[in-house]
Image: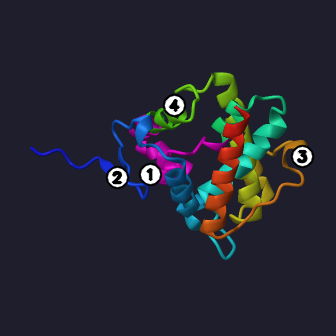
Amino acid sequence: MKQPRAWQRMLSGRRLDLLDPTPMDIEIEDIAHGLAFVARWNGQTRGDFAYSVAEHSLLVEAIFARISPDAPAKWRLAALLHDAPEYVIGDMISPVKAAVGPAYEALDARLAAAVHLRFGLPATVPATVKKRIKQADRVSAWLEAVRIAGFAEPEANRIFGRPDPALADGLDILLRPPVVVREAFTTRHRDLLAML
């Protein structure tokens, strides 16, 4: 029996095997392009543009910098790339991820490892760093929930936890065209690589 196709052709010309990804098939332009077109919250957000995973990733990296101001650039890069696998597998809301289970987590982990290796990070981020990135992710989710996804604050507090104001104050939720977000993401990636 013929195996189903498990690869995707990228705009860069790369052919990414989703089941066995290699760092050589990862390009930041493909990641930035894909994430700029993937909507968070299944597109259920206010505004004239979808709130993209690329925009969310930029916000998470900024929050991570507030949580860990002395963190080296490599961990800020890891924060920026924390949802990079979604450029090919899309963004599933947490309830769907839970329903899909370990198969989704395994696919996500394989893709994340290839992305990390491609950009000089360890395949697996240390647990302490991962915990701080997850904290930044939850702060971002709370901000998104109350500002653009229709959640009342008490509901967002219950689901995501009310963030420390020092981590959230003064941060904007940006809704920009994909081409603008794509450029912002690639620029931030380039800036962080230059700091390594």
Check disc 4 and give the amino acid type: Leu
Ranked by sequence position, the earlier of labels 1 and 2 is: 2
- Residue tagged 1: 88
- Residue tagged 4: 117
Q: Nearer the viewer, mark 2 or mark 3?
A: 2
Q: CA distance from mark 4 to mark 1?
A: 17 Å
Membership of 95 in magenta stretch: yes
Q: Which mark is residue 8?
A: 2
Which span of residues is magenta-colored?
80-108
Residue 74 rendering spot, x and y as whole percentages:
68, 31
As drawn, 187 above or below 61: below
Q: Nearer the viewer, residue 87 or 121?
A: 121
In the rendered image, the residue lying farthest to the left is 1
Q: CA distance from mark 3 to mark 1?
A: 34 Å
Q: CA distance from mark 2 to mark 3?
A: 41 Å
Check disc 2 and give the amino acid type: Gln
Ranked by sequence position, the earlier of labels 3 and 1 is: 1
- Residue tagged 3: 165
Residue 53 rendering spot, x and y as whole percentages:
60, 55
Q: Is the residue under label 1 in contact with that under label 4 (CB below 8 Å)?
A: no
The residue positioned 78% from the left and 29% from the top of the image is: 71
Report whether 87 appears left or right of 40.
Answer: left
Check disc 3 and give the amino acid type: Pro
The residue positioned 54% from the left and 33% from the top of the image is: 116
Q: Nearer the viewer, residue 113 or 158?
A: 113
Q: Residues within 10 Å of mark 2 (few under 14, many from 20)?
A: few
Q: Nearer the viewer, mark 4 or mark 1?
A: 4
Ranked by sequence position, the earlier of labels 2 and 3 is: 2
Q: Is the residue under label 3 in contact with that under label 2 (CB below 8 Å)?
A: no
Report whether 22 appears left or right of 31.
Answer: left
Residue 115 rendering spot, x and y as whole percentages:
51, 38
Q: Is the residue under label 2 in contact with that under label 4 (CB below 8 Å)?
A: no
